[in-house]
Amino acid sequence: MMATSPKPYSILVADDDIGSRETLRSIVEPEGYRTLMAASGEEAIDIVREEPVHLVLLDMHMPRLTGLETIQLVRQVNATLPCILVTGDASEDLMRQAFRVHAYSVIPKPVSKNVVLYTVVRALLRAYGGGRTSERGKR
């Protein structure tokens, strides 16, 4: 039988702004997630091709490829990978476009730690099922 840690998930954070990347890393890493970082959509796609990634948190506005374009290209590599768009302008139009490319959710900036963690946990549960047990040993 394989031993599993409670959260064996890798989260890719893609944002051209180092401050935003570090903020997202500082939210998810203390929860036990392995964090991979990308400074562009292109770099994010390369990482998805080469590494086991379970979820992508990505900024909408990056040079060359937007978050939406990156999600579309990620889908060609891994069609079921949950992608969460993070943006400073969560307009209705952007929300429609995000759901058209099957983004799991859109999180507004500035991000709230609770919103990020809630959304990440929900996306992982939906994608990979409820295999985690946080109350082991209870009788």
Image (cartoon, grey):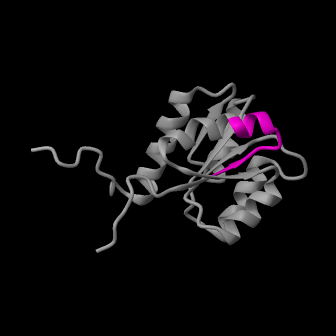
The magenta segment is: 12-22
In this view, which residue lies farthest toward the bottom? 1
Is residue 84 located in the magenta-colored stretch of the structure?
no
Is residue 21 located in the magenta-colored stretch of the structure?
yes
Looking at the picture, how far across and down is residue 134, in whole percent? 29, 45
* Residue at 68% across, 25% down: 110
* Residue at 84% across, 52% down: 65
Apparent side of residue 122 relative to residue 24 in the rendered image (left or right): left
Apparent side of residue 32 relative to residue 74 in the rendered image (left or right): left
Looking at the picture, how far across and down is residue 100, in whole percent? 65, 50
Looking at the picture, how far across and down is residue 83, in whole percent? 61, 51
Which residue is nearer to you in this view: 88 or 18? 18
* Residue at 69% across, 70% down: 49
Quadrant of the image containing the C terminus? top left
In this view, which residue lies farthest toward the left? 139
* Residue at 80% across, 59% down: 43
